[in-house]
Each structure stands twice: as C-alpha cells, then as structure tokens.
Amino acid sequence: MPFKTMGLADPLVQGILATGYTAPTDIQSQAIPAILDGKDIIGCAQTGTGKTAAFVLPMLHMMETVPQKTKKTKTRALVVTPTRELAVQIERAVRGYGRYMKLKTIAVYGGTNIDKQIKFLRRGVEVVVATPGRLLDLINRGSLNLSLVEMLVLDEADRMLDMGFINDIRKIVSELPAERQTLLFSATMPNVIKKLTESIQRSPVMIQIGQQHNPIETITQHIYPVPKAQKMDLLLHLIEREEMGSALVFSRTKRGADRICRKLNQHYVEAVAIHSDRTQRQRLKALD
Ligand code: AMP
C-alpha cells in the first residue's frame, strides 16, 4: 500500500516525498492504518525497520486533521525514549516529516540547560520528545502540563526497562489523561513490559515485524581473534581495505574510546568519541 492511499494528510504525503521515501516498510504498512483507526498498538520491531515513521506519521496526521481543543498551544503528543541521542533523532524526524505543517516541537533530555527548555515550553509545544529523567524533572517543576496529551509513544520500552526507568515511566503515565492513544515499541517482550502494556493500554493490536534477530538480518557479523597489541592495526586495516565511509567502534571503557580515537586521528582517520564524560554538545557534534 503506497503512502498516498493510506489516507495520510496531504502535507504529510508531501513531507514523505521530500524525505525521499517511495513505499512504506512492513511496520509502517501494518502500524499506520491501525493507529489512524485510533487503536493502541504494541510494535515488536527493532531499530532499522522504519518504526519511527510508523508512529510519527499517524501522530502528525492526527494533529493536522483534528483541531486543537484549546486556543493556546498545548502538548498533544509525547514520545518517551531511553537515550538523549534517540530523543534528538526522533525530534528531527518529526520536524522532517512535518516540514509542511505548522508545528512546535522540542526534544528534552538531561545534560543540557533546563532553563532554556522551560522557556521554550512556556510558549507552547505540540510534540515533546523526551528522556524519562528530564521529563519528570520538568513535570515536577510545573513546567510541562501533560493533561491534554492525546497520544503517548513509548519507544524502545525494553531498553528503558534495562536502564531502570520503569517506575519513572509509570509516574509519567499517571500525569496523562486516561483518554488517549498509547503506542508502545519494543524489540523484545519481557514479562515486565507485558504487564506494563496491560496497565496502560486498551486492547492493543500486536504488530510483530520479523523474527527477533540479534543483530537484524541485514547485518553480517565477522569475528577476528587477534592479540591485543594488534587490534589497532587490524582496525586501521579493515577501515582502509573495506573502504568504509563511516564506522562505529565500541570500546569497553571511556578511556579506551578516547585512546582509539586519538590513534585513528594519528593515522588520518577522522574520528570522534561519544561517552558520558563528554559534554552533550560534544556528543551531538559527534553524531552530526
Ligand atoms: P528507524 O527504524 O525508524 O530507526 O528507521 C531506520 C531508517 O529507515 C531511517 O534511516 C529512516 O530514515 C529509514 N526509513 C524509514 N522509513 C522508510 C521508508 N518508507 N523508505 C525508506 N527508508 C525509510
């Protein structure tokens, strides 16, 4: 089913075209009609399946087609996500798909100036994308009113659970009106998440995309056993031989990440490190 026949509002179809997508992915084909139908959904899908657009598009459709109940701009949709980087990415996607709509959006997360966020929120924001800690902080300070939220999205619920956010999630949900649409996405479905869905969703439609693979099918894994002293040479060799345009290197420690970065730079490979000792500004710059 092409995007056009899904019944999405015109500015959104234009936004999708401008983004360069021609056809919906599996999760989009299955989730978008159900969400447009007003259903709660549980999306069992991994990153890389196109799940962000699967919830962002129907969310923006709702905003475009259902008039706001109040004169002053109110928060109508809330997306909660485990990491700062993901919050930034999702908020960018909202702005991208909604480029032909009038829309105020914000990503709120820790490690950045809260006063600026408070000031921005005061003017009224329709879509808030947030990490749980900062979101609760803003709620507790009375800077964010969620009483008129119509759609709640919990993205990567299993990771939020792993990161110990489950109680924060419950507190956040208790700030929302009972009458709302709740979409939950999770790559895995541990019991705690199942219980959570039972307490916060209404007869959710379950959408499972593919088998749970780790990593997803499009990724091939190789393993190279080498002595420690040769790891750096191997890395440099692989980067050159495979003519990698970009690569992600994971390291056990923060210092290790810095060291790898320095070594790569010494060999004229442009590299930047992301870890929790770097400022949010440096982390965002690295992502860019
Ligand atoms: P996600 O699983 O939401 O992180 O998306 C994975 C990647 O797929 C992102 O880079 C999206 O921009 C891209 N993507 C999402 N939907 C589509 C689509 N319908 N056609 C092509 N690419 C897409």
Image (cartoon, grey):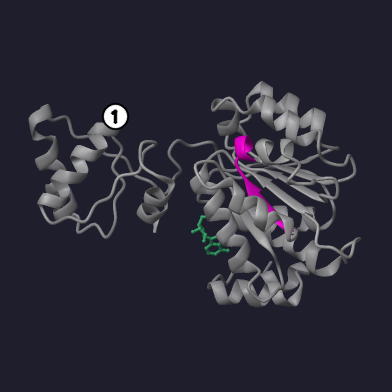
Vertical placement of residue 171 versus 76, above or below = above
Name which residue lies at 19% across and 59% down: 243
Residue 55 visible? The answer is no
**Which image quadrant: the C terminus?**
bottom left
Name which residue lies at 54% across and 41% down: 110
Tell me the quarter of the picture where residue 172 sits.
top right
User: Per the image, is 128 magenta?
Assistant: yes
Numbered range of the magenta stretch: 125-134
Camera-side residue: 185 or 86?
86
Residue 35 in percent (x, y) is at 78, 53
Residue 117 in percent (x, y) is at 62, 52
Using residue 255 as the reference point, say whether residue 274 is left or right of it: right
**Which image quadrant: the N terminus?**
bottom right
Task: Identify residue type, mark 1.
Answer: Thr
User: Per the image, is 95 magenta?
Assistant: no
Q: Which residue is mark 1?
A: 253
Residue 105 in percent (x, y) is at 66, 60
Tell me the quarter of the picture where residue 261 sits.
top left
Name which residue lies at 56% across and 38% down: 82
Vertical placement of residue 93 versus 148, above or below = below
Using a 10 Å C-alpha cutoff, classify the residue at mark 1 as few (fewer than 14 neighbours), some (14 to 19) or many (20 or more): few
Name which residue lies at 38% across and 46% down: 219
Residue 64 visible? The answer is yes
